[in-house]
Image (cartoon, rainbow, N blue to C red):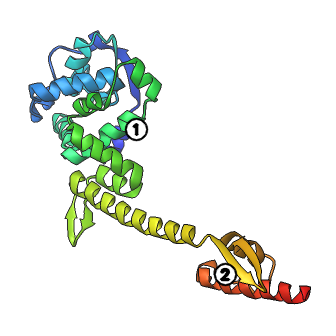
Amino acid sequence: MLSDIIREIKIEKIKINRLKDKYDSSSDINPTIGHEDFESLILSINNQGQNDPIYIWRNAIVDGRARTEALKQLGVKFVYVRKLPHKMGIEEREEVARMKETRRHLTPTQKACKAVLAYYNVSASVRKSKGLNQESYAKASGASKANLQNAIYIYKNNKQWFDLLLDGKKIEYKNNLTDSLRILVAHLKEEKSLQDKINNELDEELYMSDIVEEVYHNKNYVYNKVLMGIELGNKENAFKNPDAQQVSIQDVIKFLQHKLIDELNKED
């Protein structure tokens, strides 16, 4: 297959002035990009370097006209290329150009996800030294800042979703499929809010019942029932349970009360 042949072609570094000014006719398959996309491309290459090699045939550009022009404007002296075989016919070269163009048709969500990877591929100190921020990476990837921030939230909170979105897949939400970053972030935040509420209620319940004072035989006994319950549970067969989640706070209280009464009876 043609894709297998291309993968086997090694990437080479050559002087940019070796590229012919006249493009190969196969490059006409792809439309030229607009001004805004070109400005984003310049920002991207300036921030991240040349990540995608230029495809050439006998030093004429098959794919990478905009990248080459951007590199020239940035004053780059060397470029990375893949040299297509000299004997490759025009139809195969046109197919190469078509394949590369198809890969570039990214959705706004994919652009934002790629911007996130580029953002985290550089350390915070390097970003600071170059004066780069989230807006810089959004512009360089052709994504909106809002989409980038939403993609970052998904990247941090649901890596599985992020990988699917990066591949152009959609996520099931309320019986529908969506790649809307705004909707998916709202869903994740709603889930997090519900979980936080449950955790807070549990923490409050534990806090309210953490320190207990019991009176037996006119004597006051104050203890931390949760910690004591865990400590005693590790020592007493009567309290051991193969599934710790099945042991409730009430179980701990009852066990401690019986344990305490037994100790008082021994004293008497």
Q: Residue at x 64, y 85 (%)?
A: 251
**In the figure, residue 13 lies in which quadrant?**
top left
183 to 49, vertically: above or below: below
Q: Residue extending furthest front?
A: 218
Residue nearest the observer in this picture, 50 or 198: 198
Circles 1 and 2 in contact, beta carbons < 8 Å: no
| Residue bearing the label numbered 1 | 8
Left-right relation of 229 to 249: right
| Residue bearing the label numbered 2 | 252
Q: Secondary structure at mark 1?
A: helix
Q: Position of residue 175 (x, y in %)?
A: 21, 73
Question: Considering the image in quadrants, where does the C terminus appear?
Answer: bottom right
Residue type pointed to by label 2: Val
Q: Position of residue 78 (x, y in %)?
A: 35, 14
Residue type pointed to by label 1: Glu
Left-right relation of 230 to 176: right
Q: Residue at x 58, y 73 (%)?
A: 209
**Front position among marks 1 and 2:** 2
Q: Position of residue 87 (x, y in %)?
A: 27, 31
Q: Residue at x 26, y 53 (%)?
A: 168
Residue 224 circle label: none
State which tag comes first along the sequence, 1 or 2.
1
